[in-house]
Every structure is written in C-alpha cells, then in structure tokens.
Image (spheres, rainbow, N blue to C red):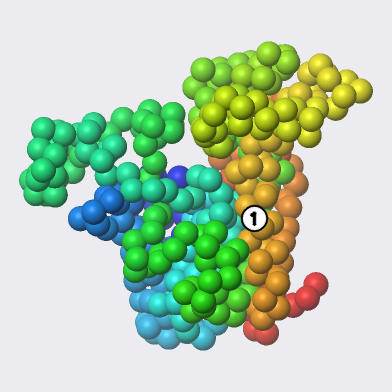
Amino acid sequence: MVWIYGGGFVEGATGAYSAEGLSVFGNVIVVMVNYRLAMFGFLRSSDGKFIGNQGLWDQHLGIKWVHDNIVAFNGNPDDITIFGESAGSVSVLYQAIYPGNQGLFRRVIAQSGSPLAYWAFQEPNADKYIKITPCALHPLDSVNCMKSVSPQDLQIDMSFVLNYTLAFQPTVDGDFLRGTPADIILGNSTSFSKERAFFSSLDIVIGFNTYDGFIFPLANVDQVQALYDDPFVMTRELFDNMVSFYIRTIVKPTSKTEEALIRSLIDFTYTDWTKPNDMDLLRDNMINVASDAGMFAPSMALARSHAHYNDGRTFVYMFSAKPSTNLVDVPMWIDGKFSVTLSIVLCMLHVDLLVDNGLNDN
C-alpha cells in the first residue's frame, strides 16, 4: 500500500504519519511517498515555462519505484494499492487517470477528495505567484530569476492561499494531465480514451467523513473565531455571510443576477422552512453546503462515472464514527465528527478486502 499524504498541495510530509499499526494489523507493507508542494510542486505558467504538476510526477516516480523494488522487501509488485487523504485523495485519483501508471497498481482508496472538486484543479498560477516574490522586478526573465533566488525567498505568506488569492493545485500540462478532470472523467471525447481505459480498469474505494466540509469555512478568516465560540451561536446573518463567502470564492458568479439565482437555490435547498432560524439547523446546514460542494458531490460524481464503465469495482463510504481525539483543533459543537484521523484509520477497515483476492463485494 502506497500512502500519499494531504495538505492542500501546500504542506505535508510522510513524517507526520505512522504506518506501523496498519502494517501490523493489516499484514501489508506500507510505503509513504514525499512529493514537492506549493510553488515547488504546482507552479504553472500559461506559456509553459513553468510546467506544473511536479508534485504529481514525484508521486508517479515513487509509485514506480515501489513497483520495481518491492520484491526486495517481500512485497508483491502485482498487488499494489495507492491511497491518500484530502489532497492525497485527489492525488491518487489523478494517478488513476494517468495512463503512464498502467501496470504499476491495481487499486485506489481515495479518502475525502476528488479531482472534480473546485479546490483540486487550477488554471495557470505563475503570474499571480511571481507578482508577490522578489522576481516581480524581472517579469521578462522570471525563470532565471527564480533559479537565482534562495528557496527561503521564494516562500510566500500562507494567507494568500487561505484567502483564495493564490492556489497551488494540479493543472493541464499536456503531458501528465492532457485535459481537465471533468473532460477526462465525465466526458466522452476519444482524445482521452487511454485515460478512461486505465481509470475504469482499477478497483476504487472513495468516500468522505460526515463533517468534512468544516475545513472550508475556516478559509473565511473573518468568521473563524465565531466558529470556535462556546457556546457557538449561529444566526441567520452569520449563515448568510458564510453562504455569500462560498458563492464568491467557490462558484465565482459572473454577474449579480447569477449570484442572486445561486443564492436563492442554496437558501431553498439548505433551509428547513418549518424552523428557518433554528440555530442548530442553520449551523449544520452551513457545513452541509460546504461538504456537498467541496467533498460529497465531486466524490459521488466520480464514483458514478467509474461504476458506469462496469470494469473495475466501485465502492463508496461515508464515515461517521465519533473519534476519541482529533488531529486538529475543532469546535465543541462539531461533536467529534470531523477528523483527518478518521479518514486515515478508515483504510484499516478495508485492509482485509485489499489483500489476497482483492476487493470483495461485501
């Protein structure tokens, strides 16, 4: 089993995870792969001088190394599963639509993340990035400038990422990713027949945690403190502000009319009109909006598409068990339903399905 960690494509490391429990109780060999992040791993310019997807290539080479060398560690190169959480979940699914991985692995476990999500794909970002680096003074020679600048000076304040000013995510590079995830996974163009053939041949488990969407409101820095208040008081005004934030940063409407229409649809769908101002219902529905947009709908769309091919097997889960502790600080009202620990531990439930004869239909 090859583990690819998450962290929004801007942070993370194998050192943050321990695989001993999984390897002992699951009787599997677990390999964890590091890959380049942020500007070093996902910088793409419209002219292609910054190629992008370096992080995905790192993952691919790591998977290939495991396939080519795992026999020396008593492993089976013909029985490899790749798995990841959050951006790692997105990553393993990007690996699942790259035909160059043919024969390197058989199965994928994608825990809380789909390439079809709004936060999992980007347009070229190099111009925005260069403008906030020392190389802004050398726009015509930005490549050589960046080569001459120290890695420390190329770092940027994370606030640019958190407030959606700048993103570091996979992008179309014409090589690893020849089209958008939607074009490849949901489309029917023969241009991507090789990608779809490989994707459909794999067994895939994809799912999410009940409160996965809580991570997205944290991007609204103006409202973060309110979320942690105890007791947390959810008002209609706060709900409206959060929904407006989602629309502005996720959907990015092109007109006031479009924004108003989207707003009306969200209000209609996510309001219990028998109790329109109930604090608990408003609070839960705020998370539901974010969960559906960022996690649930993109994951289900991918699962439906994969199942449609009826080649590899498709499994979907929703994980709702309450953990004793969380890896990250969460408000009391979440009641333990959000945890990156949950999604990581979940794979242990599937280990018996993944060894020997592969996935079973139970």
Q: Quadrant of the C terminus?
A: bottom right
The image shows residue 137 at horizontal and vertical percentages of 11, 33
Does residue 360 appear in this view?
A: yes
Q: Residue under circle 1?
A: 299
The front one of 10 and 53 is 53
On screen, residue 131 above or below 14 = above
User: Badge 1, how many Cα within 10 Å: few under 14, some, many 20+?
Assistant: many
Give the left or right position of residue 260, taking residue 285 as reference: left
Q: In the image, what residue occupies the spot 55% across and 21% down?
A: 224
Does residue 30 appear in this view?
A: no
The front one of 76 and 100 is 100
Give the left or right position of residue 259, taking residue 42 as reference: right
Q: Quadrant of residue 165?
A: top left
Q: Secondary structure at mark 1?
A: helix
Q: Quadrant of residue 108?
A: bottom right
Q: In the image, what residue occupies the spot 36% across and 76% down?
A: 65
Q: In the image, what residue occupies the spot 22% across and 33% down?
A: 131
